[in-house]
Image (tube, helix red, strand yellow):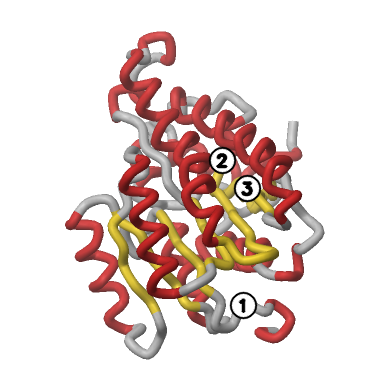
Amino acid sequence: MMDILQLKNKNVVVMGVANERSIAWGIAKKLFEVGANVIFTYRKERSKGKIEKMLADYTDYKTAVIECDVNSDDSIAQAFKQISTRFGDIHGIVHSVAFAHAEDLKNRFHETSREGYAFAQDTSAYSLVAVSKAAKPYLADGASIVTMSYLGAERVLDGYNVMGVAKAALEAAMRYLAADLGADNIRVNAISAGAIRTLAAKGVPSFNQILHKIEEQSPLKRNTNQEEVADMTIVMLSTLSRGVTGETIYVDSGYNIMG
């Protein structure tokens, strides 16, 4: 299977690990399993400490933890320059970064502040554009960029509010990036993951109700999990998906197809 994926000894940047429950951490573990070199980025020192603690069981793997503030072009540029210097060509990027202020999720949507709206867009959507721009000089031929989205990008989900609008912008940005970078043989796709108990999910007031609704209404009658999303991400990073770009892939037990 590792030969089919062709990810062994490839350099993949994983952005957005907060703790063991993070989707990004599940993806990183799968990347280790297939022999990839995994470079993590972090924004704050406490995140760096958490990642380094989780990596204690992965000392036999080639990895690094690099500072990268996605709200700063200079920080992003420096991060990818540093990654390239240490590892060489970058073969994949996992963009699992999103954030909105708590009050902009709890309040009614029309009460979203101008600053809160701009911050959610900058962190959750524009960051993909900024990362793609900074990373492009270091991306290998055939590189793959995968970002994480959610059904709130296209449907109104109670309590998702400004983050839903940011995810809609993220998916649109993904398509425009795919069209733009395709000529350079760089693919860009999104994975729309189902409801998973992550740190970010705790900020959505209706999260528990969403879990129960998916169990009741999805074709598979269950929720997805970190491992299933990670498996699909590995496929989208690998040569198995070499003919796919500009797509949003749903890993949600089929919930998105239901009326």
Comes first in the chain, label 2 or label 1: 1
Tell me the residue that label 1 is attached to. Answer: 7
| Mark 1 surroundings within 10 Å by alpha-carbon count, few (fewer than 14), some (14 through 19), many (20 or more) | many
Badge 1 vs badge 3, beta-carbon distance below 8 Å: no
Q: How far is disc 1 from disc 3 in space, using C-alphas?
A: 19 Å
Q: Which mark is residue 248?
A: none
Q: Amino acid at mark 1?
A: Leu
Whether residue 7 is visible, yes or no, is: yes
Comes first in the chain, label 2 or label 3: 2
Tell me the residue that label 3 is attached to. Answer: 190
Comes first in the chain, label 1 or label 3: 1
Badge 2 vs badge 1, beta-carbon distance below 8 Å: no
Q: How far is disc 2 from disc 3 in space, using C-alphas?
A: 9 Å
Residue at 52 percent of width and 61 percent of height: 138
Instruction: Residue at the far right: name it.
Output: 243
| Mark 2 surroundings within 10 Å by alpha-carbon count, few (fewer than 14), some (14 through 19), many (20 or more) | many
Residue 19 appears in which quarter of the rendering? Answer: bottom left
Q: Position of residue 3 (x, y in %)?
A: 70, 86
Q: Nearer the viewer, residue 66 or 208?
A: 66
